[in-house]
Amino acid sequence: MVPNRATIVKAFTAALVLSLGLAGCATSPAEPVSSPSPSASSTQVPVASRIVISGDGLAVESADGALLSSIPFSEDVMAARASLTTVIGSEPTVTHVAEDICSFDHDKYDWNGLSLVPLNSGPFRAERAFSVELTAPKVGRSLSLESSDGTTVGMSADSLKASSGAIAGQGEGNQYFTYDATPVAGEAGVFWGALVGVNADGTVKSFTAPSLTPDYC
């Protein structure tokens, strides 16, 4: 039987309606999600690279020489200990030191290459609460321990000896000299500075500051 015209029109209309309905149910493509761009104001936090010792205190610097913090020798001993613990990244070993002819009863704080001790009362020491000794080229998280000209323990002491303010000295079979020396007001021949211990081969053995020259034990 051949379908009549009316039947064909109805079938075509039904098919058209069905196709339009399916198209309406199709999922629209999702809008692309853009990734957040990094903030233009974000900066990298500088990291401590070295500790520099001078006659006045310690300076904590980044690899490019930027000053991150300073620890003057006039700072409270426990505050200085806390600052060094933060910079070095570990607690010090604490050793009790008994009183003797040149020292009072005190605790020594040692970070295996850098040690801190309180200063006893004595001539010209009113503004200096503690001293620091460096006996290694590095400490803690590979922090370099340096003089103001970049010299470390184990390097030649020649450049420091030739620096402005260096004062030669000799002591107990080992060579010593002071750099970054500052005269004590009203006291001829008396200086504060950083004391350098020198090995027989001319390399640096240690740094100690502040140090009084001559030392009034």
Image (spheres, rainbow, N blue to C red):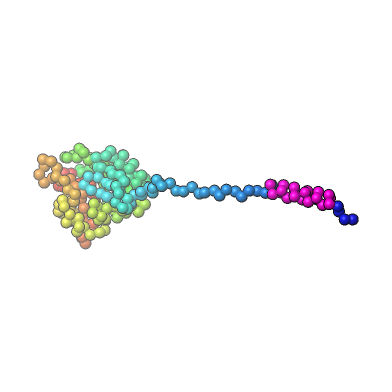
Q: What is the quadrant of the N terminus in the image?
A: bottom right
Q: Nearer the viewer, residue 110 or 178?
A: 178
Q: Residue at x 25, y 59 (%)?
A: 155
158 sits left or right of 90 in the view:
left
Q: In x, y percent, where is residue 214? A: 14, 47
Q: Tell me if residue 8 is in the magenta stretch.
A: yes
Q: In x, y percent, where is residue 195? A: 20, 50
| Residue 95 visible, this orientation | no
* Residue closest to the far right: 1
Q: In x, y percent, where is residue 169? A: 15, 53
* Residue closest to the far bottom: 201
Question: Magenta stretch mostly in which secondary structure?
Answer: helix
Count up the numbered dots: 0
Q: Residue at x 86, y 52 (%)?
A: 4
Q: In x, y percent, where is residue 139? A: 33, 52
Q: Nearer the viewer, residue 39 or 102?
A: 39
Q: In terms of image quadrants, where is residue 176?
A: bottom left
42 sits left or right of 150 in the view:
right
